[in-house]
Image (cartoon, rainbow, N blue to C red):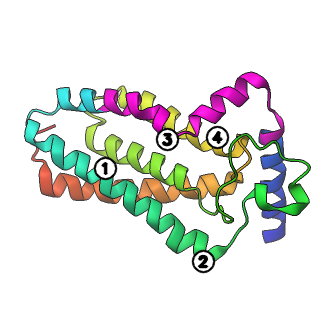
C-alpha cells in the first residue's frame, strides 16, 4: 500500500511539474520566493491593526508570528527532514530527466515542506485569531498558502505529499500558537 501511495505521489508530482509554460514559470518562481510576499504581509498587518481595538496587542502578535515561523521551520527540519530522509524529487536520479526545475533544488530532503508549514501556520494562526473580525482574511490567506504550496511542486522541489504534510503540520502549529496568543495577549474585547 505504501508503494502505491508513493507511486501516486510521484505521478501527481510529474503531472503538476510537467504542466509548465513561460507564464506559469514566472508566477511560480516568484510565488516560492519569501521576499516577494513582504507587501502582502504588510497589508495583513495593516488590516489586523485596524481591527484590533487594543493597539498594544500588535507587538505580541508579530512576536507570536515570528516564533511560529521559527518553530515550524526548525521542527520541519529536525523532526521530519532529518529523520525521514525522503529525497526531494530534484535530487532523485530516476526523475532527473523528467523534472522541470524552476528554482534551486535546495537541501537533499523534502519531507515535509517548510514553505508549506510556514505559510499554513501563519494562515491558520491569523484565521483562528481574526476570522470573525476580518472575514475576508480567509479569501486572502488560504489562496496564498495554497499557491505557495502548489508552487513548490510546480517548481520541482517537493512532492505533493511533502506539501500536504507541511500544510497539516503548519496548520496544527498555527492553531496551537493562536490558542497561546489568545490566552496570553487578548481579551474578548480586543478583537
Residue 93, given in percent of the width and then of the height, sits at 87, 62
- Span of residues in magenta: 17-44
State the CA–CA distance, disc 3 to disc 2: 25 Å
Residue 86, given in percent of the width and then of the height, sits at 70, 68
The residue pinned by badge 1 equals: 65
Residue 115, given in percent of the width and then of the height, sits at 53, 50
Q: Residue at x 13, y 43 (%)?
A: 57
Nearer to us in this view, 42 or 168: 42
Label 4 with label 1: CB-CB less than 8 Å: no
State the CA–CA distance, disc 3 to disc 1: 15 Å
Q: Secondary structure at mark 4?
A: helix
The residue pinned by badge 4 equals: 150
Q: Quadrant of residue 135?
A: top left
The residue pinned by badge 3 equals: 34
Label 3 with label 2: CB-CB less than 8 Å: no
| Mark closer to the chain start, 3 or 1 | 3
The residue pinned by badge 2 equals: 83
Amino acid at each position: 500500500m505504501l508503494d502505491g501511495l508513493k507511486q501516486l505521489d510521484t505521478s501527481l508530482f510529474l503531472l503538476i511539474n510537467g504542466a509548465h509554460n513561460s507564464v506559469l514559470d514566472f508566477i511560480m518562481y516568484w510565488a516560492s520566493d519569501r521576499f516577494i510576499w513582504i507587501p502582502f504581509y504588510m497589508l495583513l498587518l495593516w488590516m489586523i491593526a485596524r481591527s484590533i481595538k487594543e493597539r498594544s496587542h500588535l507587538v505580541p502578535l508579530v512576536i507570536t508570528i515570528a516564533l511560529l515561523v521559527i518553530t515550524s521551520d526548525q521542527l520541519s527540519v529536525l523532526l521530519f527532514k532529518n529523520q525521514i530522509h525522503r529525497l526531494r524529487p530534484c535530487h532523485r536520479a530516476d526523475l532527473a530527466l523528467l523534472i522541470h526545475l524552476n528554482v534551486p533544488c535546495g537541501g537533499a530532503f523534502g519531507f515535509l515542506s517548510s514553505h508549506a508549514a510556514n505559510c499554513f501556520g501563519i494562515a491558520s494562526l491569523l484565521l483562528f485569531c481574526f476570522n470573525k473580525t476580518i472575514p475576508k482574511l480567509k479569501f486572502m490567506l488560504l489562496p496564498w498558502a495554497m499557491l505557495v504550496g502548489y508552487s513548490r511542486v510546480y517548481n520541482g522541489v517537493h512532492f505533493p505529499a511533502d506539501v500536504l504534510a507541511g500544510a497539516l503540520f503548519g496548520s496544527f502549529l498555527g492553531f496551537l500558537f493562536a490558542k497561546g496568543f489568545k490566552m496570553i495577549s487578548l481579551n474578548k474585547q480586543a478583537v
